[in-house]
Image (cartoon, helix red, strand yellow):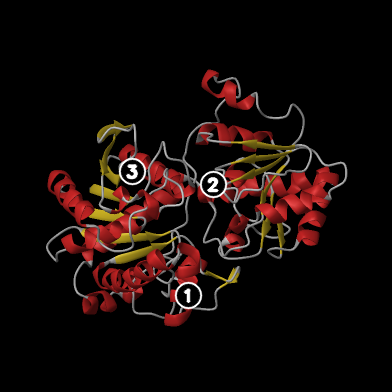
Amino acid sequence: MRILMLSDFYPPVLGGVEQHVSSLARALVQRNHEVAVATLAQPGLPAEEIDDGVRVHRLSGTAQRASWLFKTARRPWAPPFPDPELTWGLRRVVARERPDVVHGHDWLARSFLPLGRREGPAFVVGLHYYTLSCAKKSLVYRDAPCSGPGPRKCLGCASNHYGAAKGVPVTIGNWLAGAGERRAVDLFLPVSTAAAEGNGLLGSSLPYRVIPNFVPDVPAVPASALDLEPYLRQLPDGPFLLFVGDLRRAKGIDVLLAAYGGLRQAPPLVLIGKVWPETPTELPPKVIVLRDWPNRAVMAAWRRCLFGLVPSVWPEPFGIVLIEAMASGRPVVASRIGGIPDVVSDGETGLLVPPGDVVALRSAMARLVGDASLREHLGATAAIRAPSVRADAVVPRFEQAYEDALRFKGTLDQRDQTEGIIRP
């Protein structure tokens, strides 16, 4: 099968979605599929290259030229509506790759919409965020989980987030292009039940199948690997706690630092991730911030830590760090919000706490720091369940989804008739 992935970002740009796209593309190549990826151009990276058997095409868009639109120049997102230059670039890529299936992963997929034809490739879209429902992708309204979209509510919220000049067109563009996406997509692939619900798929006539993220089937990287030594030397010599992800309020970084600051006799806290303008600059003692780590080094850090921390305060659709910890046999203390409870079983593979609750987070951290037998029990259970989130268990589900999308590609009425087959 010939598969074309569409992703706003792709390694070496770091992040959960781009890591997932890279892992899925490579796994499919190993299973004898022909895979290409179209992604946004990045300074210093070639327009085309072969990445471990995956053909990568980097495209420039009109929106990218307006650097003032983006909070960080390193992540110039595709717009939530078709970008003329990106559509033209995708036309060339599709003509060259001749895919059977186009698998979109973010707003770049919206620029494929003008190219979708009934006789063309099947079109599936992975939902890693709440892109169908929310112009901010987060379903967060006034620093709390949103109860649902509404015209005035969304316009005001997006304007507060992006600024009025950007928020209004982004919101309206997301509504219009989202409606087009609902008509054009043959199968949606949300990463969790929470993602399906937040994107309005539950109870709708839209075809979908929940398929989670996964960790690649690769042997454990030895700690002595030469290319990892510069990274691993930065870790504490003794036990430490680990947070991996963007150092942002939505990820609960402020809550985590407040909870950790009041933790007695705490081991060091290591934060691995991207620093943003909102990242706190004043940190409690024994907090170590490490930036721009490759995934192999992150996995080695997971195997060295006592336990992980995922204190998100937004309804995280999934959280790939959860399955990285599970695959490493490490428990996590995480928020009971979004898709996190789909992965973490409270009292079995980790501990769940209310989002934003500093006292509850501190108490759970203290409990695991002080109880080695509980850490070992939770970590062992996580390791036992890890095969369910590895590539050899999850990638065949993507292959089946592609086959179903090809088989039942057609009008919305035809998709409705296959509801019992392609829904979970």
Judging by the rendered image, the residue that carries numbered circle 3 is 28
Judging by the rendered image, the residue that carries numbered circle 1 is 156
Judging by the rendered image, the residue that carries numbered circle 2 is 387
**What residue is rendered at 38% in x and 80% in y?**
204
Q: CB of mark 2 within 8 Å of CB of mark 3? A: no
- Compared across the picture, whether 33 is left or right of 227 comes to left
Quarter holding the C terminus is bottom left
Q: Kindly identify the amino acid type of the residue bearing the numbered disc 3.
A: Leu
Q: Is residue 320 above or below residue 209?
A: above
How many marks can you see? 3
Q: CB of mark 3 within 8 Å of CB of mark 1? A: no
- Label 1, secondary structure: give it: helix
When asked about the image quadrant of residue 165, the answer is bottom left
Among the two numbered marks 2 and 3 on one chain, the one whose residue lies closer to the N terminus: 3
Among the two numbered marks 1 and 2 on one chain, the one whose residue lies closer to the N terminus: 1
Q: Nearer the viewer, mark 3 or mark 1?
A: 1
Q: Kindly identify the amino acid type of the residue bearing the numbered disc 1.
A: Gly
- Label 3, secondary structure: give it: helix
Q: Kindly identify the amino acid type of the residue bearing the numbered disc 2.
A: Pro
Q: Position of residue 80 (x, y in %)?
A: 33, 62
